[in-house]
Image (cartoon, rainbow, N blue to C red):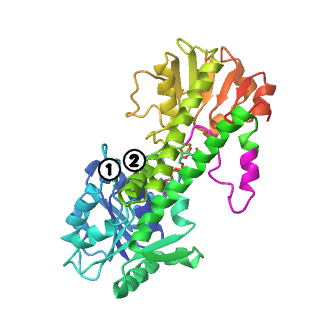
Amino acid sequence: MKISVIGCGYLGAVHAAALSSLGHTVTGIDTDPARAAQLAAGSAPFHEPGLEPLLQGGLRDGTLHFTPDPAAAAGADVHFLCVGTPQEKTTRRADLGYLTSAVEDLAAHLRPGSTVVGKSTVPAGTSAILTRLLAGTGADLGWNPEFLRQGTAVSDSLQPDRLVYGVPDGTAGAQVARVLDEVYAPLLHDGVPRLITGLATAELTKSAANAFLALKISYLNGIAELCENAGGDVVHLAQALGLDARIGPRYLQAGAGFGGGCLPKDIRALQAQAEDAGAGSLGRLLALVDTLNTETRHRIHESARQMCGGQLAGRRITVLGAAFKPDTDDIRDSPALDIALRLAGSGAVVTVTDPRAAGQPWFRYPELRFEPETAAALRGAELTVLLTEWAEYLALDPRGVSSLVDRCAVLDGRNALDAAAWRAAGWFHRGIGRGRRA
Ligand code: UGA
C-alpha cells in the first residue's frame, strides 16, 4: 500500500520505518526540514535501539522517504496522523493545535476513498472534530492508538500486544477496518490480537492504558513508603503480588517513579477530561496518582539528606542517570533530573552522568556538573544515587568503584542494584521501600 505518515517525531518516525519493513511504500512528512533531512539520511534524531537499521533498510529499498512537503501525501491510500498533542500549560488539557492544522493541510491532498488514521494520544471526541474538518474530501477516518515504549519502540511496533481499530459506524467503519487489516496483514498473520471499537473508545484506550500503568507504579511507590515506615520489603512484596495472574508482574517496580513525555502528561490530560465530562472521582484518583509520583521524588531527596547526616549543603553527590528511563536519551519530566536538581537546590554539589542523555547539546543545567565517564563522575563522591537503571550501572563492580569514592554510600533509587553484593563490598546500601524489618 502507499502510506503517508504525518509528523515524524518519536511515534511517526518509528511507525513509518516499521510500516516500510512490513512491505508498504511509506512517505514520512515532517514540517521541520532538518528533521526530515536527518531521517532521509538514515539517521535517527533520538536514541532508539534498532531504529536506524530499520530506517536504512527502507531507504535503501526505496520503500521509505522523508520530506517536509505536505503535498507528498497526495496519492497515498492511507494517512497516519502522528503529530504531538502536548500539554496546555494552564489547563493541563491536550493541545490539539498540531493535529487540527495537520488535518487541515492534509485535506487539500486527499483523494476520495482514502483513509485517514489517527495515532496521536487525544481526548475522546477528537475524531468528531477531525471528521468535520475532513467533510467533503471523501476520506474516511479511523483511530488506531499506538502503545510503543521508548527504548523498545521497534519491537513494540512489530510485535505489539494488540491492535485497536476505532472505526465509524456503518459501511465506512467496515471499510476502515478492511484497510487497517491490509496495513497490518503480516502482524495479524503472526497472531497479534485485534479489537474493533467505536472511535471514542479507541481514543480513550490509549490514555486509559497509560493512566493505569501510572496508577500501578504510584500504588507500588505508596506501598514502598508503607514498607519503609512499617517494615517490609517492597521488592519481595512486588514479586509476591506479580505472581497473581490477576495483577501481573510488570510496572510494579518501586523507585523514583514515572516520567517521560507520555505518562505524566497523559494522566493530567485524562484528569482534565474526566473533570470536564463529569467523572470527578476518576479525576481525583488521577490527581492523587500524580501527587504520589511527585512525593516519591521528594522522599528520595529526603533519604539522600539522611544519608548525608541531615545536611546536604556542600556534600558531593554523584547521580547515576539523567534520562527518564534506560535506553533513551529523553530527559522530559525525568525523575532523575528532577531529583538531581532538588539536591543541587539544597546546596549539594551534584555531578550527573548518563550514557546518552546528559552531554547532549540540549542538556544545559548550570546548577549540575556533567561528567560523561562513570568512573570520573564517581571520583570523590560522598553519596552515590542511582536514578536511571542503565545496564552499565547495574554491571558496576562495587569493589572496583569503592576506591574512587570518598564514602561508600549508595542510594538505589530504582531498587535495581544487587544490594547484597554492594553491602558485601563494604558499601552502605539503601533502597526504596526496603524497611529495616524486611
Ligand atoms: C509509555 C507507555 O508504556 C506506552 O505504552 C505508551 O505507548 C507511551 O507511554 C506513549 O504514550 O507513547 P514510555 O513513556 O516510553 O511508554 O515509558 P515506560 O516504559 O512506560 O516508562 C514510564 C516511566 O515509568 C519511566 O520513568 C519508568 O522508569 C517508570 N516505571 C516503569 C517505573 O517507575 N516503574 C515501573 O515498574 C515501570
User: Residue 41: percent from the left, percent from the top?
Assistant: 36, 53
Residue 82 among those drawn in magenta: no
Q: Which quarter of the rendered picture does the C terminus lie within?
A: top right
Left or right: 70 in relation to 185: left
Which is nearer the eye, 268 or 419?
268
Residue at the image position 44 percent from the left and 80 percent from the top: 182
Kindly indicate whether the residue at mark 2 contacts the one at mark 1 (C-beta within 8 angstroms). yes
Left or right: 419 in relation to 151: right
Q: Secondary structure at mark 2?
A: loop
Predominant SS of the magenta segment: loop
Going from the N terminus, do you reach mark 1 or mark 2 first? 1
- The residue carrying mark 2 is 45
Res. 414 image quadrant: top right
In the rendered view, tell whether residue 424 sits above or below residue 346: below
Q: Is residue 437 in view?
A: yes
Residue 256 among those drawn in magenta: yes
Q: Secondary structure at mark 1?
A: helix
Which residue in the rendered view is the most extreme toward the bottom?
A: 171
Q: Amino acid at mark 2?
A: Pro
Cα gap from disc 1 to disc 2, whole angstroms: 7 Å
Which is nearer the eye, 35 or 262?
262
Residue at the image position 57 percent from the left and 73 percent from the top: 192
Q: Residues within 10 Å of mark 2 (few under 14, many from 20)?
A: some
User: Which stretch appears magenta?
Assistant: 237-257
Residue at the image position 35 percent from the left and 47 percent from the top: 92
Q: Amino acid at mark 1?
A: Arg
- The residue carrying mark 1 is 35
Q: Is residue 263 in view?
A: no
Q: Residues within 10 Å of mark 1 (few under 14, many from 20)?
A: many
